[in-house]
Image (spheres, rainbow, N blue to C red):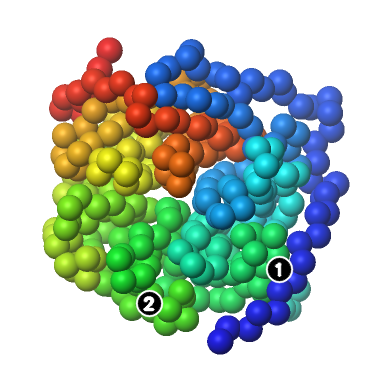
Amino acid sequence: MLPRSLFTLTILLVCSLSLPAAEEETYDSNTTAPQPGVLKQEFVYEVPLHPQCHATTIAETPSGLVCAWFGGTHEKNPDVGIWYSMNFDGTWTEPLELFNGVQEDGTRHPCWNPVLHKVQDGPLILFYKVGPDPRTWWGMMAKSYDDGKSWQKPVRLPDEIPGPIKNKPFTLTDGTLLSPTSTENAGWRVQIDWTKDQGRTWHSSGPLNDGEEIGAIQPSIVQYGDRLQILCRSRQGRIAEAWSDDWGRSWSEMTLSEMPNNNSGTDAVNLKDGGVVLIYNHVGNGRRDRSPLNLAYTKDGKNWQAALVLESNPGEYSYPAIIQASDGLVHATYTYKRRRVKHVVIDPAKLEFSPIQDGVWPE
């Protein structure tokens, strides 16, 4: 049995990270024209308690939704911690800093890329990274047994197991969690780790690519029938992909799909209808802009259809997370100009599609 000594969350407003009201910019969460399928647009919080935020994650529990991100002065600054909010009654709670990177010797490192995942009939797990940079960080894991109201003390993962690097684990029918992860200390290389006991022991595929011909990180795992696919951020201007016919134990050679990628994070999720939705910046031609932010749909992982343009104004809209809740609605969160976390609710049954040909978003 795991120790169940839980410590209670205490909501502390970190005044030293708050911005003066005079510096605050006005934001509108309804930034796009009405589109079929978009039911709600909102910010998880209106007044930031930190100068910058990034890398959102969202999960559903029996009590409601939970969301996390990293926030602080700016990415890579030692004061960056993991921030957290719950939505159990239709309203997001005041954000709080859940965990930070303070070490036993008093030194402090930045935190990175939280990933929330609710185990069926098990705990809510939060994975995140701590360390000076993505080449030297290490994985951390914390568990909650009351839907995120209180948490166990975080534990460090084995050095060779970073944990889910940005996107949520994928659960096999036998309960095995596949962890989509990657490393950056020897080139950008993807690996798939797995655990059958909720993170107590781990196994790994090892690198799936050499990091040279294709430099890829931050995979998502999706399923079509009895095949799995990973969709990855890459340095080559397109989303990288690989396939598995043995439930993630081995993978095909990594290739580049037709879908553009501007070296920015993506996420994907299976829908109950058997299809997959991908949330990403549909930006190619060498551009680094993280706008627009788009939603695409596929039934086979090869033929994609345009569904939504979630953001199209100038600014950064990036590092999205996406899930389908038990009621069938899709929930997406993402970085909004590095200042807020935006939450969008989508009814996939109401989406309207247009084919994406040769990676070109239709007019």
Residue 79: quarter of image = bottom right
Relative placement, left or right, of 173 versus 106 is left
> Which image quarter holds the C terminus?
top left
Q: Circle 1: is it few (<14), some (14-19), or many (20+) Cα within 10 Å?
A: some
In the rendered view, would you say 226 is above or below 287?
below
Percent coordinates x, y for residue 167 in the rendering: 42, 53
Q: Confirm whether residue 269 shows in the render.
A: yes
Relative placement, left or right, of 293 versus 24 is left
Q: Earlier in the sequence, mark 1 or mark 2?
A: 1
Q: Nearer the viewer, residue 173 or 143?
A: 173
> Which image quarter holds the N terminus?
bottom right
Q: Residue at x 66, y 79 (%)?
A: 4
Provide the residue designation for mark 2.
196
Q: Nearer the viewer, residue 56 or 170?
A: 170
Discs 1/2, front: 2
Provide the residue designation for mark 1.
102
Q: Amino acid at mark 2?
A: Lys
Q: Residue at x 19, y 42 (%)?
A: 301
Q: Using the numbered discs, state the Cα–Cα distance from disc 1 to disc 2 in whole angstroms.
A: 30 Å
Q: Residue at x 36, y 70 (%)?
A: 175
In the rendered view, would you say 218 is above or below 294?
below
Percent coordinates x, y for residue 8 in the rendering: 77, 66
Percent coordinates x, y for residue 44 in the rendering: 65, 37
Q: Could you say whether the residue bearing mark 2 is in a helix, strand or loop?
A: loop
Marks 1 and 2: CB-CB under 8 Å? no
